[in-house]
Image (tube, rainbow, N blue to C red):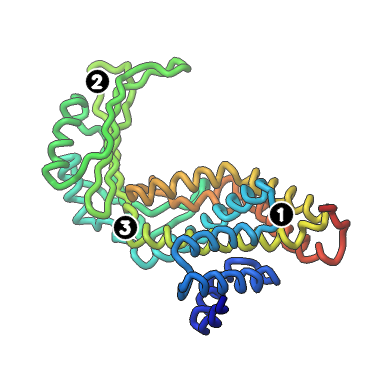
Amino acid sequence: MTPAPPASAAVVRRYQRLLRAYPAGPRRAELLDTLLLAAADEGRTGPSARQTVNLLLTGARARLGRPGSVSIVVLAVLVSLVAGLYTASAASVIAWRVAAPPLPNAAQLAQIGEVVTPGRPAVAETAPGLFHSTDEGVRFDTASYWTPDYAATRDLPGYAAGLRNRLESNGWEIREHEIVAAGVTSSGITFGARMTLSAARGDWLLSIETDGGSGEATPAPADAVGVQVERLSPWPVRVATLAGLVPGLLLGWLFTGWVSRRTERHHLASTITVLLTGLSLTFLSIQLGVAATKLAAEVWNGSTDAEPFWHFLVYDYEAGFITVFATVLAVAVLPVAILAPLRGTRAPH
């Protein structure tokens, strides 16, 4: 049988690039020789699509070490998602500062006021920036106004129906609308009927609510009407945020693999890293879950609820000390992994 001719330099480079998915070591060279022989026998000049996917997946798994362990894969996925949230947060902040749409100016807010509360001029309360900090964390700046004792609200269903018609005729798309009937709270306090409505147009989300007042007055008192305009997340911001997930997912996986391979033969170091990582993820679990949910909503329909999804992950959040503590635990993994090959008891295979 005639031996296959040696692979060209171009073919070798194609396989070498693909095999970088595996951690550095003799396994790469072994796989390269095997793949080049198979390619020569089959007359191929590079990896097939199926072979590429298979090598990338098996290489990613090989980077985690600990063959046969399912828990290390689960841990790597969780760490990657956390890292992805943080890099997506950084991308979101940058994208908002570059591509944030303007809030309505005084004239535009007055036009909105003529639709929402005809005959009562809007007195704007517009925050001129993009973000601001409160006791509860970071919030987006908004444009808003408050109209007290608006007579049309005495007939709340009639006012709501007219409001919907006016908004739709002015290009607003109604997203949510609810009228809550008058009632009594569990503590015995009566409240009047109240209305909430949200509508979108272009880069803005309009939120309208009446205060409900007291349910005891006869005839029914006129309610105050609160109006707020916030920015919807524009497409450039959403795309940049999704793109920002990718480096975090990749770095989280690579870092977990590096720590895992560095500590897998050292029982004490392995136990400490698992404990530190588990505690960090536990302390951050609620914030991460809420941030991920809000990120999904922002990407899906642009809604932000006037707060960036990442505000739960920064110290400004009212429970920010938990974030700091969890971060310290996570960072402590690094020196443990660095020192692991130098000290510690080797775990049996």
The residue at the point 30 percent across, 45 percent down is 228
Label 3 or label 2, whichever lies nearer to me, is 3
Q: Identify the amino acid type marked 2.
A: Ala
Q: Nearer the viewer, residue 155 or 235?
A: 235
CB within 8 Å, label 1 to label 2: no
Residue 202 against residue 11 in the figure, above or below? above
Disc on the earlier residue, 3 or 1: 1
Residue 68 against residue 8 in the figure, above or below? above
Residue 23 against residue 114 in the figure, above or below? below
Q: Identify the amino acid type marked 3.
A: Pro
Q: In which quarter of the image is residue 59?
A: bottom right
- Numbered mark located on residue 234 in the image: 3
The residue at the point 27 percent across, 26 percent down is 179
CB within 8 Å, label 3 to label 2: no
- Numbered mark located on residue 45 in the image: none
Residue 347 against residue 339 in the figure, above or below? above
Disc on the earlier residue, 3 or 2: 2
Q: Can residue 292 be seen in this view?
A: yes
Label 3 or label 1, whichever lies nearer to me, is 1
Q: Distance between the residues labelled 3 and 1?
A: 43 Å
The residue at the point 16 percent across, 43 percent down is 115
The residue at the point 76 percent across, 57 percent down is 264
Q: Identify the amino acid type marked 1.
A: Arg
Q: Where is residue 73 in the image (x, y as percent from the top left)?
A: 63, 50
Q: Position of residue 303 (x, y in %)?
A: 35, 47
Q: Mark 1 points at which residue?
A: 66
SS at circle 1: loop
SS at circle 3: loop
Looking at this rendering, what residue extends furthest in the front direction? 1
- Numbered mark located on residue 220 in the image: 2
Q: Distance between the residues labelled 1 and 2?
A: 71 Å
